[in-house]
Structures are given as structure tokens and as C-alpha cells.
Amino acid sequence: MTIVLGANQYGKAECRLVRIDRETPRHRITDVSVTSQLRGDLDAVHIEGDNAHVVATDTQKNTVYAFARDGIGAIENFALRLGAHFTGNFDWITGGRWGIEQYQWSRIANGEDGYDHSFVKASDEKRNTIVTVDGDDISIVSGISDLVVLNSTASEFWGYPNDRYTTLKETTDRILATSVSARWRYLTTELDFDKTFDDVRSIMLDAFASTHSLALQQSLFQMGKQVLEAHPEIGEIKFSMPNIHHFLVDLEPFGLDNPGEVFYVADRPYGLIEATVERDDAPDAGRAWDTVPGFC
């Protein structure tokens, strides 16, 4: 038996960065966390402790900050710039993974347009991307997480098997709530990523709201199906959607009725619905999904 080195990567994780664009009196804010990880001819450092091919993780961090001086733009384009830099300037670096999570801010209200220089962080919703370079192959998986949505009606759940352990009552009117995490794989690197992200998010929200749901799985599929129908540049989309259960509170001990108005929210355990919606003719994903955790 011989012991050999397997797949590996290294880099600097979660470089927090806020950039204020001040080109005009109306400022813009970009708030991101960037992770850079390199792959390539790195056997010597693992086996012998030879650092000749190690681009220090501190160097990777500094590169992220220096590149931000010229602007960030769409997070996909920023990750592509970083990938091109490291694979283009170090011959032994043949690929890597650049992941970016973006935090959303909105302007503090002041009439129709809001203040020029004041912002509020309104929710935990995040935009994200992972750019993977593997030799000449470049893949982009982008998405959204912690997008919390709720339908107060137009949701049912019935017709499921019953056995000796089944206690859940069938219903034709329930609250349907979830926190959407979705990732989609782009089939091109030439795209207006900001515009596409905004449209994908809008389509998913509209599909969730307009689907009279018989199961969260049905809502999930409609969200993915409508995104793929509208965007041929996306090959597949993966979802992870917990069912945020809302249970009707029994107010009878207090002499009160409860006509579907007062609920308590259970944080755990929860149903977890995950699925991929894909084109049957989409090109092979290669290594695009190798380091995207949390999706089936």
C-alpha cells in the first residue's frame, strides 16, 4: 500500500469587506465576505513542508482588498477577476475556488429616493456566488440564502399515508412559510449578473406567491421551473427549503375561539425539502458543485 495526497485546496476564508462608492454625492455600499482557495502543484508543501509554491493566505487576503480599490461590481465578476489573477500570475496554480457572500442594505427612507448616504440592513437575506476554475474550465454557481417567505393561505396538505405513528391532521388551509436557499449554475461567463440575479429572485417570489400549494415540494418545483423557462443561460437550480411550521394555538382553555389567527412558530424539528430542477439537455456540470455544501 502507498499513501498519496488526494484533492486539496487552501486559502483565506471570510475576508470581510465593505466598499463605499463615492463617485457621486449619492453613495453606494457593497458589503461582502470573500473566500479565496487555490489548487495546483502543491504536493511538496504537504509532503515535505516546502513552501516554494505556497501563495500565502495573507497574500490572498491582501489581493482581495487591493482589487476592491478598483470596484467590486457584480460579485460574479469580482470572483472571476480574482480567479484570473491567481491562475494567470502563478504558473503552478491551475485552479481554485472563489466564494463570495453579499449582504443586503437599503437606503433609509427620505421621500421617494431615500438619503444619499444613509443605509439600513433590513434582513438576513444574502446573495452568493462560487466561481470554480479547473484548468481551462470555469464554472459559476450563484444563489440566495435566508430569503424568508410566507403565504397566509392558499396552501393545503392532505392525502399522505397514515400509519400507527401518524398524528398530523390533514388540512385544506394552512400557513406555508420557508427560508429559501437556492443555487443556480450559469452556462456562460458573459452576462449581466446583477440584472439576472434580480430577475431570478423576482421570479421565485412570484412563483411562491402565485402557486396554490398542495405541498412545499410543489412550490419548490414551480419556482425552479419558472426560473429555467425565463433564463436559458441557467442550466439547473438547487433548493434547500425548511418548512417553518406554524401551529394553531388552542385558546379554548381561556374561553376563546381561534379562527385561524393566532399561531406559534416551532423552530425545530422542521421538515426540510431539497431538490434540483434541471434541464435534461444541460451540459455536464464538471466540478461546479464539488464545494457547494447543503444541497442534494
Image (cartoon, grey):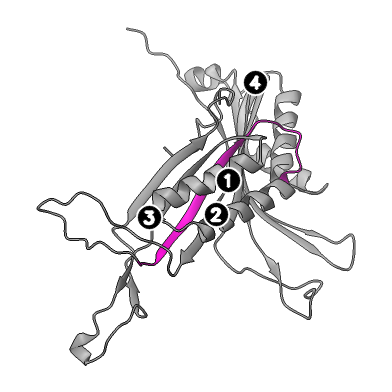
- For image coordinates 16% across by 52% down, the residue present is 162
**In the drawing, what numbered circle is on residue 94?**
4
Counting other residues with Cα less than 10 Å from the Cα at mark 3, is it few (<14), some (14-19), or many (20 or more)?
A: some
- The residue sitting at 52% across, 32% down in the picture is 289
- Front one among 239 and 259: 259
Q: Earlier in the sequence, mark 3 or mark 2?
A: 2
- The x, y position of residue 218, in whole percent, is 42, 49
Image quarter hosting the C terminus: top left
Q: Is residue 51 magenta?
A: no
Seen from the viewer's position, the closer of residues 90 and 77 is 77
The numbered mark, 2 or 1, whose residue comes first in the sequence reads: 2
Mark 4 neighbour class, 10 Å CA radius: few under 14, some 14 to 19, many 20 or more: some
Q: Which residue matches tag 1?
A: 226
Q: Are marks 2 and 1 in contact (CB under 8 Å)?
A: yes
Mark pair 2, 4: CA separation: 41 Å
Q: What residue occupies the far right of the structure in this picture? A: 24
In this rendering, is residue 175 above or below 127? below
**Residue for badge 2:** 207
Secondary-structure class at tag 3: loop
Q: Quadrant of the N terminus?
A: top left
Please name which of the two marks, 3 or 4, marks the residue nearer to the observer. 3
Percent x, y for residue 123? 57, 66
